[in-house]
Amino acid sequence: MPRGTLEVILISAKGLDDNDFLSSIDPYVILTYRTQEHKSTVQKDAGSKPQWNESFLFTVSDSTSELNLKIMDKDNFSQDDFLGETNIDLGPLFEVGSLPETVHKVVKDEEYCGEIKVALTFTPERNVEQEYSVENESYGGWKESSGEF
């Protein structure tokens, strides 16, 4: 069971549906891992090719291995529009520790609607029990005193 910190670097997106009536879309991303949620800044008038270059941290404490990225369009006078989403399998990340910038398909209603680029890093929690070793013990202990009886 992996435990540690997940860092998500949200880099950019492209090919998003730029369908606002009078202006370009103002995209932002909602990043969700289990019950933890972060929201990127809104890229005002960025249209279909927003750049974020933002970093987000999540605490990993169980075997949940999926990160959801939901791309939204900020609207001032109505509810924000859902542009699409992607789910990223974190299983390979937990094994190797980091994944370079990778492009993931964005899907809406099971149809391709753009791409989002992220980089991922997993830093395992240091386990105190793993650091202890009998061989490294330099003063009295069970090994030295057990022969006296």
Image (cartoon, grey):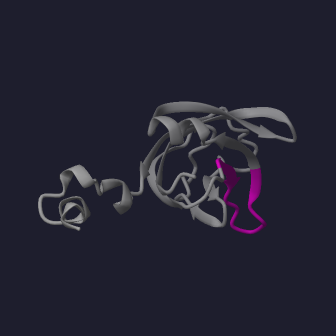
Residue 141's x, y, as percent?
A: 21, 65
Q: Would residue 80 appear left or right of 120 to someone viewing this image? A: right
Q: Would residue 51 appear left or right of 89 to someone viewing this image? A: left
Q: Would residue 57 appear left or right of 31 to someone viewing this image? A: left
Q: Magenta region: which residues? A: 65-82
Residue 126 shows in this picture: no
In the picture as drawn, the residue positioned furthest to the front comes out as: 149
Residue 12 shows in this picture: yes
Residue shown at the point (18%, 65%) measured from the top left = 148
Residue shown at the point (64%, 58%) measured from the top left = 32
Q: 35 or 108, which lies in front? A: 35
In the picture as drawn, the residue positioned furthest to the left comes out as: 139
Q: 38 or 128, which lies in front? A: 128
* Quadrant of the frame with the C terminus: bottom left
Residue 56's x, y, as percent?
A: 47, 56
Residue shown at the point (53%, 31%) measured from the top left = 102
Residue 31's x, y, as percent?
A: 61, 55
Please check the rendered image and state whether residue 147 is part of the magenta-colored stretch, yes or no.
no
Which picture quadrant has residue 100? top left
Is 103 located above or below residue 44 in the figure? above
Residue 110's x, y, as percent?
A: 86, 37
Residue shown at the point (74%, 69%) measured from the top left = 77
Please check the rendered image and state whether residue 79 is part of the magenta-colored stretch, yes or no.
yes
Counting the numbered discs, the total is 0
Q: 104 or 108, which lies in front? A: 104
